[in-house]
Image (cartoon, helix red, strand yellow):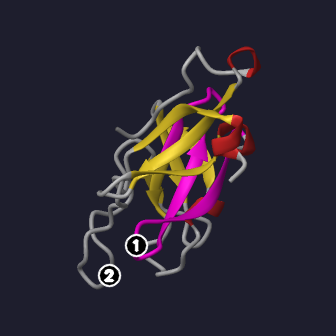
């Protein structure tokens, strides 16, 4: 599932804090603490055995999304540096390279269906979740 917010049962009173995990197809991998994600901004993380680059975003409302970090139009790994916004009420990220917009929930390109070389323009969506972790798990 892409697009998740922290569980209400996390926080200092339970000696846990929210941690963001991404499913690489084999296992859920902790990638950062939820509090380390600035609302309205993205970061790049590496996941899986091949070290795939994933752009991780936290919307201002708290929802977290994970998409491929490679811009299909330029080939640059820059999606994590994109601008968050919305188009007709749909949350999007706008690539900093050529300004193409992609839906945060589905990765669908809103501007063009294919790149100039004919490959699909959509971004891969990675399953992401926010879970409670003990202080020891977070500090590793």
In this view, the residue in front, 123 or 118, is 123
Is any part of residue 102 visible from this angle? yes
Q: Which residue matches tag 2?
A: 116
Whether residue 23 is situated above or below residue 15 in the rendered picture: below
Q: How many marks?
A: 2
Can you tell which quarter of the image residue 104 is in? top left
Question: Where residue 35 sits: x, y (%)?
Answer: 73, 37
Would residue 68 be found to the left or right of residue 42 on screen? left
- Residue 58 is a magenta residue: yes
Q: Secondary structure at mark 2?
A: loop
Q: Earlier in the sequence, mark 2 or mark 1?
A: 1
The residue shown at (71%, 36%) is 135
Question: Where residue 109 sits: x, y (%)?
Answer: 36, 57
Which segment is the magenta one? 39-65
Q: Residues within 10 Å of mark 2 (few under 14, many from 20)?
A: few
Q: Which residue matches tag 1?
A: 49
Can you tell which mark lies on residue 138?
Answer: none
Q: Viewer-nearest of labels 2 and 1?
A: 1
Q: Secondary structure at mark 1?
A: loop
Question: Where residue 41 sits: x, y (%)?
Answer: 68, 48
In this view, the residue in front, 112 or 51, is 51
- Residue 117 is a magenta residue: no
Q: CA distance from mark 2 to mark 1?
A: 30 Å
In this view, the residue in front, 124 or 98, is 124
Q: Quadrant of the N terminus?
A: top left
């Amino acid at each position: 599932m892409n697009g998740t917010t922290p569980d209400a049962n996390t926080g200092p009173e339970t000696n846990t804090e929210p941690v963001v995990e991404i499913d690489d197809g084999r296992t859920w991998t902790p990638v950062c603490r939820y509090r380390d994600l600035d609302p309205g901004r993205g970061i790049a993380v590496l996941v899986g055995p091949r070290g795939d680059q994933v752009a991780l975003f936290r919307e201002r409302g708290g929802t977290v999304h994970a998409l491929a970090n490679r811009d299909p139009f330029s080939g640059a790994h820059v999606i994590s540096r994109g601008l968050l916004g919305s188009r007709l009420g749909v949350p999007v990220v706008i690539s900093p390279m050529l300004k193409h917009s992609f839906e945060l929930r589905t990765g669908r390109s809103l501007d063009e269906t294919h790149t100039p070389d004919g490959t699909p323009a959509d971004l891969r969506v990675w399953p992401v979740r926010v879970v409670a972790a003990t202080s020891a798990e977070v500090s590793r």
